[in-house]
Amino acid sequence: MIQREFYLNKMISAMDTDFVKIITGVRRCGKSSLLAMFRDYLVTKGHITEENILYVNFEKSEYFPLQQGDALQKYVQERITDDGKRRYVLIDEVQEISEWAKIINSIRVSFNVDLYVTGSNSRLFAGEHLTYLTGRYIEIRMYPLSFSEFIQFRAESSLQTAGMDKEKQLAEYIRIGSFPAMALTENEDLKTAIISGLFDSIFSRDILLRGKIKNIGSFYKVAKFVFENIGSPISAHSIANTLKTECHRISVDAVDAYLQLMCNAYILYQCERYDIRGKERLKTNGKYYVIDTALRSQLLGSRPSDVGHIIENLVYLELKRRGYEVCTGKNNSKKIDFIAVRQSETSYYQVCLSVADGSVLKRELDPLLSIRDNYPKYLITTDHLDFSQQGIRHINLLEFMNN
């Protein structure tokens, strides 16, 4: 099992605190493997005996009966003795438990346990029942592989493409996507089967089924529209109006519900607009980005002309992986691709395929130059020449992704 140290270290740093640790992320991004890695760490480095670790995986049929919360609590209670030792409870796909937050909090307060759970749907954090855990949980957001993890996975798996130069590996990363299973196979037919299965699992199980969507055709029209327009300012109103002109009638409320379902399943991320001058978030015409380029290609087919938007998508996800809250910016009439905030740190980013053309360079620099504060400003492109100037640092995409 290839280690994902970044996330494992997050779990270790939160170990033995009174908080429930909730690992969230899109299906098949590696949450189950992370729990298994953490279990191994507890045994090998933490010197915890396996008898003191309770592992429940709700994707295995043997644990289906425990989806009733009372049954899960009884299961834990039966495995805890009066020896005074702490138990480590690891639960995979916790959203399968009825009234999960209520039950997890009850286990937390009733026994001497350290709790770790995973979930593949952000509905985990919606609804009144979550009040049982308010202020009592830590969320660890997990994503599919970063580019540096992708390189590591392929190198440690001794795949032929591991010997490619970094630029070719980045092209492969864009082509086959960032899910661990895709990085660990060389066979093209198997890659096709894996991404098709992932697509069906996420869309059918986590969206269509859970969302109880009846008009599947309308849903896919909305999904295709937003996937096609990643990085472009859009809203539920604009999508509904555009589809109406194409003779597909759909209400704004339905579009909004479909967008929310995709965001809940972590395949789509909304990047809200922020007015730099007015210092406020704007509720209209934000941008959307997809969790994985191969999933996008599975829905739309390969589109070589979309490289600029795909690069912007990569940068957005990388900033999210690094723990930034990311908005798209507005400064009067100037548009800034990303404002990234992490604690007291703020930085600005413009992303473009190439600025070798002087007019394009000016277009990309002007919005950054219009910002009067002293926070760092970056221009990210695929160019190898250094276009840094006037306090704006130019970074090659490969350097940024491999940092």
Image (tube, helix red, strand yellow):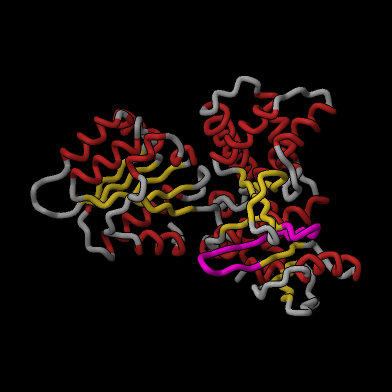
Tell which of 46 and 254 is nearer to you. Answer: 254
**In this rendering, would 185 be left or right of 335?**
left
266 is within the stretch colored magenta: no
Q: What residue is shown at x 35% (from left), y 62% (from top)?
A: 12
Residue 345 place in picture, x, y as percent: 56, 69
Q: Quadrant of the N terminus?
A: bottom left
Q: What residue is shown at x 57% (from left), y 28% (from top)?
A: 208
Rendered view: 295 above or below 175:
above
Quadrant housing residue 65: top left
**In this rendering, would 7 be left or right of 307?**
left
Residue 189 place in picture, x, y as percent: 65, 43
Which residue appears farthest toward the left when viewing the image? 82
Which residue appears farthest toward the top when viewing the image? 214
Residue 45 place in picture, x, y as percent: 28, 65
Whether residue 59 is visible here, answered yes or no, is no
Q: What residue is shown at x 20% (from left), y 56% (from top)?
A: 49
Quadrant housing residue 63: top left
Q: Main secondary structure of the magenta part?
A: strand
Q: What residue is shown at x 53% (from left), y 31% (from top)?
A: 205
Rendered view: 233 above or below 240:
below
Residue 166 place in picture, x, y as percent: 67, 68
Q: Quadrant of the C terminus?
A: bottom right
Quadrant housing residue 308: bottom right
Whether residue 237 is visible here, answered yes or no, is yes
341 is within the stretch colored magenta: yes
Give the magenta-colored segment's residue range: 330-347
Tell which of 153 and 228 is nearer to you. Answer: 228
In this figure, what is the number of numbered marks?
0
